[in-house]
Image (spheres, rainbow, N blue to C red):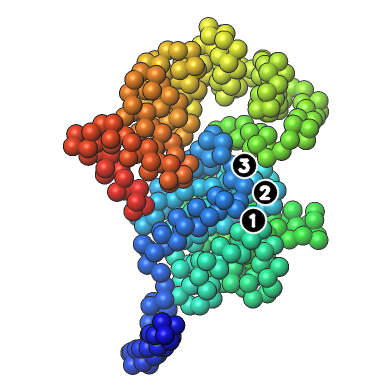
Amino acid sequence: MLARRRSKASFSWLLFLSIWLMASCAPTVKKAEEFFTPSVKSEKEMGREFAQEASKKLKLVEDPEIVEYVTRIGSRIVDAAQPMSYKFRFHVVKSPTMNAFAVPGGHIYLYSGLLLKARHAGEIAGVMAHELAHVKHRHMAQMIGKGTLVSLATLAAIILARGEPAAAAGAMGAGAALQLSFTREVEQEADRFGLFYMYQAGYDPHGLLDFFETMVREQRFSMSQVPPYLLTHPLSSERMAQIENLIQFHRLEVKEPRQEKDFHRFQAMLQAEVGSAGQVIPWFKQRTDENPKDALAWHQLGVVYNKFGWTREALSSLVRAVELDPNLASAWADLGMLQARLGRWEEADRCFERALDIDPDHGPFLAMWGEAMVQRGRSQEGVALLQRALEKDPHLIRAHEMLARAKKDLGDEGGFHEEMASFHEKMDQYTEAMKHLRLAKKAYGEKTPKGEEIQRRIEELKSS
């Protein structure tokens, strides 16, 4: 009986919808698209649900330093693309495939294979700008409205089936692949806006072309396998020529393009994160054998040694890096962290001071020194350095975790939970962030000014 009632209700709804569509003013199709296109609020809800499912099905990088490096680049693009209806989150997927994708609501996923093949940070900025344009201009929501993409649930099923969108689409047949492919018009719009966002963020728009050239080169080297990104973002010589023409026509030349610091270090950390010691160390060791005077190569080797716990080898490699290039600030900072771990506090202080002499007030270096101070038991000094670091670079993530530890050592329970909430929020761990915010409100007192401030953060997080 209940099933019969539901059936009648469904039929009534469909009948009403059909009559409404036929009775509406022209153009009927356009009205139908608008009716079925999800609202921005719905997109945010769908994006959050997708992200929660993706965290279970995809192997995501959880190293805060890697996530914050990618987020720093992405946030520059977001700032350039304002006004924005979404709060963007950036995720790194452990996979050797060259791929990236965005989902409604502001979640962008970048695969480690793509990040490691990039020749410079401008290529990554190009991918991010393009994907961000798809989200800002609601291309996927419009596909749902037009019926070319059944729903985000369909997309999630395809992407999360095997963790590889293109592979899953191929397995499900041409129909599924079509659902995932953007039209030529949509791709052109994402290219156009992406170039403007790059330019406004200070990146050379040619970075997008450089990325596509990397894709083409990879396809030539492996003719049997097309990079998955190209299956969902069709590329042609005509499209690449159009991108170059747009750059020239709109005079998007950047005299002094933004250069992200320590890209070599980021790639070494990521390689160590996704590979094994037996694979990664020999590869970086070979680079120093072939280029014994290359300070960056020695720094990368020191980073991967340190990542795998080879302390003595890491120490000698980092020392060699700063001998070859005394102005390599990030190598001095890494050496400082290693000396601190060994309990050589005075040596560590000298290394951090040297790094900050070269690059004053650089947020990541201040955060590393602050972390060393907390490990040393000097929590008050650690708090000062970590807070200063976050003022200089709001995209830092691990700094919040260390600040939480320092505040706990100092007996500040509310501060501990508040900083842990910030850490989890930046790592897009919604449930944990909400848990710590509620505990912070309880510790501060619900009716206190600080408790009311935390309540506002809770409401903002719910609606983001």
- Residue 42, given in percent of the width and then of the height, sits at 39, 64
The residues tagged by marks 3 and 2 sit, at their Cα atoms, a distance apart of 19 Å
Precedes in sequence: disc 3 or disc 1:
3
The residues tagged by marks 2 and 1 sit, at their Cα atoms, a distance apart of 9 Å
Precedes in sequence: disc 2 or disc 1:
2
- Residue 298, given in percent of the width and then of the height, sits at 70, 24
Q: Is 389 situated above or below 76?
A: above
Q: Which residue is mark 1?
A: 163
Neighbor class of circle 3 (other Cα within 10 Å; few <14, some 14-19, many 20+) is some
Tell me the element at label 1: loop
At 49% across and 27% down in the image, what residue appears?
364
For the residues labelled 2 and 1, say whether their Cβ atoms are less than 8 Å apart. yes
Tell me the element at label 2: loop
Whether residue 287 is visible here, answered yes or no, is no
Q: Residue most toward the front?
A: 1
Tell me the element at label 3: loop
Precedes in sequence: disc 3 or disc 2:
2
Q: For this view, does 160 lie left or right of residue 445? A: right
Q: Which residue is mark 2?
A: 95
Which label sits on residue 120? 3
The one of 85 and 133 positioned closer to us in this rendering: 85
